[in-house]
Image (cartoon, rainbow, N blue to C red):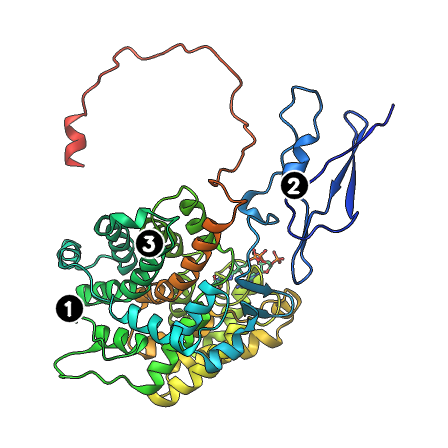
Amino acid sequence: MSTKTTTQSSPGSAAPQTGAALEISDTRTGTSYNIPIALSGTEGDTAIRTMDLRKIKETKEDFGLLSYDPAFMNTASCQSAITFIDGDKGILRYRGYPIEQLAEGATFLEVAWLLRNGELPTQKEYETWVHDITFHTYVHENIRKFLEGFRYDAHPMSMLCSTVAALSSFYPSAKNIFDKESRDISIVRLLAKVPTLAAFAYRHVKGLPIIYPDNDLSYTENFLSMIARMSEPKYEANPVFKRALEVLFILHADHEQNCSTSAVRAVGSSQVDPFSAIAAGIAALYGPLHGGANEQVLHMISEIGHPKNIPAFIDEVKSGKGQRLMGFGHRVYKSYDPRARIVKQLADDVFKETGMDKDLEIALELERIALEDEYFVSRKLYPNVDFYTGLIYRSMAFPTEFFTVLFAVARTAGWLAQWEEMLLDKEQKIARPRQIYVGPAEREYSSGLTNKAPRARKDSLRK
Ligand code: ACO
């Protein structure tokens, strides 16, 4: 069989490696291809451009080779300068800054600025940013009326998702996404109003009167005020709770190309307004496999009920017959989730304030056993960020179904930064994956119906 070699060039690579390439030989045709390793990231990630594979054809008319990657397990969908994760080493950095340092010293709005702009703000930039966000926290009264239409037991994530999507109709100029001024104000509005909508949803579920934003308070204090204030003329947040919320918001602000961020990027790539794109992110986060895990930790702990039941529970987890140990394991982190370490310290501070309870004792004992047990050690299953966050939120008196809402408030900062990065990336187009069609081949239409306009059966109305 004769072998011919074609060299495929790769347009617009970020950091081309001189000469580094894959030699691919197609056994169907005997043709060899040279596929450049066209991209390399700051921390050593490398990639080929999958479009280069399209040159690999069996016949001239052939569409070209696709790569098949359900759930994008090994596909880089973008080049991003925002967040870096090394799952093996347990590293998380925003714009190069270690999460531990940001959690220790930064404010959430400082981090939100950093995520969007790439650099820490100057004092003047920060003051303007805080001022602008503070003065856009109010929402149109119609949104409040709109919220009243929800049933008393509506899930707050449903309410948040719908009201953020509804905001799009209040700001039609937000559609001008390629105008920087329009993006600036949309980003400020979203960061300012998402906590207001989240708090309104909370008060609605509780049947409590709405508390309007207080512009004298900081971002997290104002949020706590809208949640918890009753008849007191001025709300004063517990400083430990205020700090805990600030740190938890920082830890949850971004996590590179996860499910909800990918949803924001994909929906945003259609050039829809940012309110609609962020609503898509909230919808993705709502799912129990994504933002809902911290709720599951609490359900698991209450099912265990007492520390004496832990060994039997662990045996059941290991047998694979029962549930998983919720709050353990991570798709990316194969060592200690760096956020979990910070959260554990935070939990100690909050529990000093609120007191230890039985559930915390169960959590500590579960963690101790799991970190020593061969089953968990050999599979590299460590506590993830969700293991302790639920316990912290609950001891701050947030209801379980509100945990994901808190996650969404914080993640809005990351979603917005990622959305803008996607828009300004010249290589991005509307997201549109390919498929491998496995349905029937072409066939003739021949209907088996005798009545093409049947009416609904009367009994179905009663069911
Ligand atoms: N408890 C018990 N066993 C587990 C757990 C767990 N929490 N997680 C993984 N395993 C076991 C699996 O059974 C499997 O064992 P096997 O090799 O004997 O079959 C092995 O570890 C690998 O598991 P995978 O499912 O392949 O790991 P994956 O990376 O796909 O899953 C996930 C990651 C979904 C997070 C998983 O660890 C899990 O279900 N954890 C519990 C839920 C949870 O805490 N989710 C929050 C994640 S953090 C976040 O989203 C913000």
Quarter of the image for the N terminus: give it.
Answer: top right
Q: What residue type is labelled 3?
A: Ser
The front one of 205 and 179 is 179
Per the model, the C-alpha gap separating discs 1 and 2 is 55 Å
Residue at 33 percent across and 54 percent down: it is 182
Residue 407 lies in quadrant:
bottom left
Q: What residue type is labelled 1?
A: Ile
**Dots 3 and 2: beta carbons under 8 Å?**
no
Query: In the image, residue 257 lies at what x, y percent?
Result: 51, 55
> Disc 1, ligand 1: is the CB inside 8 Å?
no
Residue at 52 percent across and 79 percent down: it is 101
Q: Residues within 10 Å of mark 3 (few under 14, many from 20)?
A: some
Q: In this view, does 373 lie above or below 358?
A: above
The residue at which mark 2 appears reads as 11
Residue at 77 percent across and 43 percent down: it is 22
Query: In the image, residue 157 lies at what x, y percent?
Result: 30, 58
**Nearer the observer, disc 3 or disc 1?**
3
Q: In this view, does 231 lie above or below 163?
A: below
* Comes first in the chain, label 1 or label 2: 2
Q: What residue type is labelled 2?
A: Pro
Residue 90 lies in quadrant:
bottom right
Q: How crowded is mark 2: few (under 14 residues within 10 Å), some or many (20 or more)?
A: few
Q: In this view, does 215 lie above or below 194?
A: below
33 vs 367, left or right, is right
The quarter of the picture showing ligand 1 = bottom right
The residue at which mark 3 appears reads as 182
* Comes first in the chain, label 3 or label 2: 2
Q: Residues within 10 Å of mark 1 (few under 14, many from 20)?
A: some
The residue at which mark 1 appears reads as 210
Q: Is residue 365 something one can see in this rendering?
A: yes
> Disc 2, ligand 1: is the CB inside 8 Å?
no
Per the model, the C-alpha gap separating discs 3 and 2 is 32 Å
